[in-house]
Image (cartoon, rainbow, N blue to C red):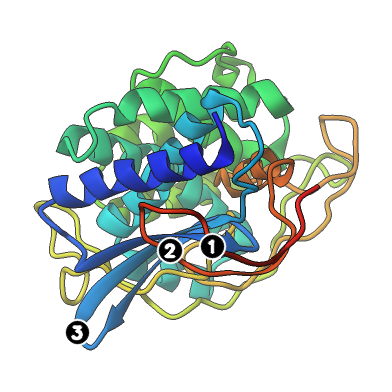
Amino acid sequence: MLGIEIKRGVEATLERVFHATGNRFDKLTVVWNGKTAGVCAKKVNGAVDANVIFPSIDETKAVDKKLFNKLIGYALHELGHVWFTTNKPWDDARENGTAFLSALINGLEDPRIERCVYQSDYAPNARALFENLTNAILEKDGYVQPDDFKNIPFMLAIEGRRLNGYSIGVPSIVDQSPWAEHLKWALQSAHKARSTAKIVEIAIELEKRLRSDEPPEDNPSEPTDPVNPGEPTDSGEPGESGGDNGEAGEQGEPGDQPGDKPGNDKGDKKTKRGANGKDDKPREVEPTDFINDELSKHKADCDQYRERPHVGKPVFTDVYFY
């Protein structure tokens, strides 16, 4: 497939999702000129507009068909946060907590909102797309070690999806973890949770339990500096109040990472040498960087990209293909 076919396919698919949701948004737009991938939902004159943002793609380059499914899976995951994550409890927890706590919330919330998406029938094949995206991430970067404390949030995100019924291409490592008892409790509790507020309660309790069994100083550690919350945002969930007004609120900037959602501050730090045998940051719970890497080899080198109709020739300004 050519890049232009990928773009049109993504736009057409998300347009069908837009109509299937009963227009939960007043407007849904796909933008291909972002520096990173993400979803931004905001109120404009009382109406809720959602923008799915991807980096630019060279429309003349051949693109693997598999990328199409990854892009749709990513977009549905991020839209799932807009539909089903109530941001205020998350922001409140971040205000008095740590980046690690926010990442724990992210790791437990991701499987929950994906389950909400495919159970809602907004996108009938959503579960298969989420499963495909999860396995693609694991195939590219591998899994984490069971005793890697800083990567517990990533482990929760994977194992929570396994509880959703996804066929995961790597074996479970929960039983091998020094914190297996705590992780099993959190995963089972989160699987039954019906709101972001409940996920936050579980994450707070899990952090307390993990702190009581925290590894020695020379073992992998997680960031502990408090981070400031972003602007509180509210998005509804079927059967829930959706925060203050039950409507999709303004999301963070595109490409927010674990520890940042739903606000924008980035509190993660470099950590000591971890169980993976290298100096690195904790693995990101959100698949944003994975999608950015997938699109990087297909990007268009241009100074400006103008939106165009779904039909007709693409319009670029000062484009240099290479």
In whole angstroms, how far apart are the C-alphas of marks 3 and 2? 26 Å
SS assignment at label 3: loop
The spot of residue 283 in percent (x, y) is 69, 42
Residue occupied by mark 2:
308
User: Which sits in the foreground, 308 or 229?
Assistant: 308
Residue occupied by mark 1:
315
* Viewer can see residue 302: yes
Tell me, for residue 46, which label it has, or none. Answer: 3
In whole angstroms, how far apart are the C-alphas of marks 3 and 1? 32 Å
**Circle 1 Cα neighbour tier, 10 Å, few/some/many (<14 / 14–19 / ≥20):** few
**Quadrant position of residue 40:** bottom left
The spot of residue 284 in percent (x, y) is 64, 46
**Circle 2 Cα neighbour tier, 10 Å, few/some/many (<14 / 14–19 / ≥20):** few
- Amino acid found under the numbered disc labelled 3: Gly
Q: Is residue 265 left or right of residue 183?
A: right
- Amino acid found under the numbered disc labelled 2: Arg
The spot of residue 204 in percent (x, y) is 45, 54
Q: Do the residues labelled 1 and 2 touch (CB within 8 Å)?
A: yes
